[in-house]
Amino acid sequence: MTTPDSRGGSYNFAYLDEQSKRMIRRAILKAVALPGYQVPFGGREMPMPHGWGTGGIQVTASIIGRDDVLKVIDQGADDTTNAVSIRNFFLRTTGVATTERTADASIIQTRHRMPERKLQEGQIMVFQVPIPEPLRWLEPRESETRTMHALAEYGIMHVRLYEDIARLGRIATAYDYPVQVNGRYLMRPSPIPKFDNPKLDRNPALLLFGAGREKRIYAVPPYTDVKSLDFEDHPFEVQSWDHTCALCGADDSFLDEIVTDDKGGRMFVCSDTDYCAERRTADGANAEAAE
Amino acid sequence: MSADLPLLRVSQVSHFYGDRAGCRDVSFDLWPGEIIGIVGESGSGKTTLLNCLSARLQPSHGRVIYRDRSEVMRDIYALGEAERRFLTRTDWGFVHQNPRDGLRLGVTAGANIGERLMAVGTRHYGNIRDTARDWLGRVEIDAARIDDLPPAFSGGMQQRLQIARNLVTAPRLVFMDEPTGGLDVSVQARLLDLLRDLVTRLKLSVVLVTHDLAVVRLLAHRLMVMQRGRVVEEGLTDQVLDDPHHPYTQLLVSSVLQA
């Protein structure tokens, strides 16, 4: 399966060679069979530095087909550097259709956010993961963390949450908030805000996580239980805002604070640009219909 | 029937580092509520033996059999790793000579005490804190210091914190490696006092390794003297110390300075 010469050169469809894709797909299948388990894979060098999403890109490259419609987001936005360059990368190496609309996409690669719109069956989310091991900052030895996973010894993670409460009066971890998948493996959901954690639970879409530098793939299959860790007397809760989105008025989305001048001016807007735009278009249409 | 069986049965445990023997042919029974002291000079194999007994170092020969809470005698090296690890952090405790080896220095005193509770599934923050405060009190640390980091504590306090951290899950057997080493005498005396009190009250069995004869005199019921990996003499503590038979024990007892 090679791309036509019109797309320049001798790169294979979606950059990776077919054997590499097969290897990654096998890792993905294993990851789906063991929800939350980190499957090692032979990560390839990609034409960009680690930390730019090489894990997610390899996963996307292995699953993308000619009929797919790709959406790439970075911090919720479709128009930031990381999102634009990854989208262009796949546009050049596959020629598949791309979109900014969550509803139209079959594959959504993301960094740091999940879309506000509910995902559907058949859609696939690909997360870029910097550090896949949830126990890493608590236990430096890889051999030991693997044993801890094997024996489901996860008490130490609660020690971390305990420390949060003891020092700050509440669980202050706001992103990359540890979850337990399917009642078994402890998992880092990648640096999404904990606001998005409830969306992981029993999501109809397939969620794939790729860590390029650490060469690990893990997955949350559709409709899998994902529980955010907490204490009985300090239950998990998501952040909330005193504002609504300054552009679309949404009160149910994750808001970014944007500084507008050097006199203390600031506004709060949806971080999910597609969600915000969709709401504004709908409002416009409603207003027109009302006239 | 459980009263007929020892808590820990050690039979012919030997461990070799290459050709050299760490410890050789050690056998003894430890009964519930009993404290056994192991003394000897540096390099006599005390620590090797302790590691073999506490499931930290698989012996080259011999067996270590533990009577678990369901009264079944189990070879600790035949247990699966999951069971063995569970045992070592619930039913057992290990007090290191250097509290820094036994504590998590990056988290507060409360979290250090609460870690074992959380490891066995306690998920109520308030209860964990109450237990931690209670244990700080029992080891004579001001409960107001619950949110301090261990490095902010003195050596004696760190050692007491380590003891609290081990005892919080109500273990039945505690291994201690020179628990009073590196502490000055007045702090040592307080710690010994505290240990004696806790051990009697909780009916703990203890394997206590030390080179300090005063410590075993105060704490241990029975005593084993080790030299070059072998147990050269054993018996009731007072008996061994007051009427030593083996030349090495005689040397050891006579080397202690009388204050």
Image: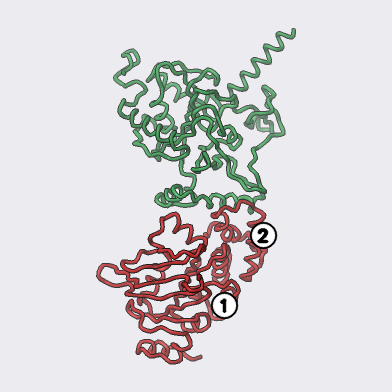
Chain colours: A green, B red
Q: Is residue B57 left or right of residue B189?
A: left
Q: Earlier in the sequence, mark 1 or mark 2?
A: 2
Position of residue A89 measured from the top left corner of the image (x, y, whole percent): 41, 23
Q: Chain of mark 1?
A: B
Q: Is residue A124 left or right of residue A165?
A: left
As measured in the structure, the alpha-carbon distance from the residue carrying label 1 to the one carrying label 2 is 24 Å
Do discs 1 and 2 share a chain? yes
For residue B117, which quarter of the picture? Answer: bottom right
Looking at the picture, does residue B189 appear above or below residue A243? below
For residue A177, which quarter of the picture? Answer: top right
Position of residue A153 measured from the top left corner of the image (x, y, whole percent): 49, 51
Looking at the picture, does residue A231 appear above or below residue B65? above
Mark 1 Cα shell of 10 Å, populated few (<14), some (14-19), many (≥20): some
Position of residue A48 measured from the top left corner of the image (x, y, whole percent): 39, 31
Which numbered marker is on residue B236? none
Per the image, the residue denoted by label 2 is B130
Q: Nearer the viewer, residue A236 or A173?
A: A236
Can residue B235 be seen? yes
Q: Secondary structure at mark 2?
A: helix
Q: Residue furthest right?
A: A291
Position of residue B258 measured from the top left corner of the image (x, y, whole percent): 48, 91
Amino acid type of disc 2?
A: Asp
Mark 2 Cα shell of 10 Å, populated few (<14), some (14-19), many (≥20): some
Can residue B178 be seen? no
Q: Is residue B35 left or right of residue A29?
A: right
Q: Chain of mark 2?
A: B
Q: Secondary structure at mark 1?
A: helix
Amino acid type of disc 1?
A: Arg
Identify the residue at image location x=54%, y=49%.
A157
Per the image, the residue denoted by label 1 is B196
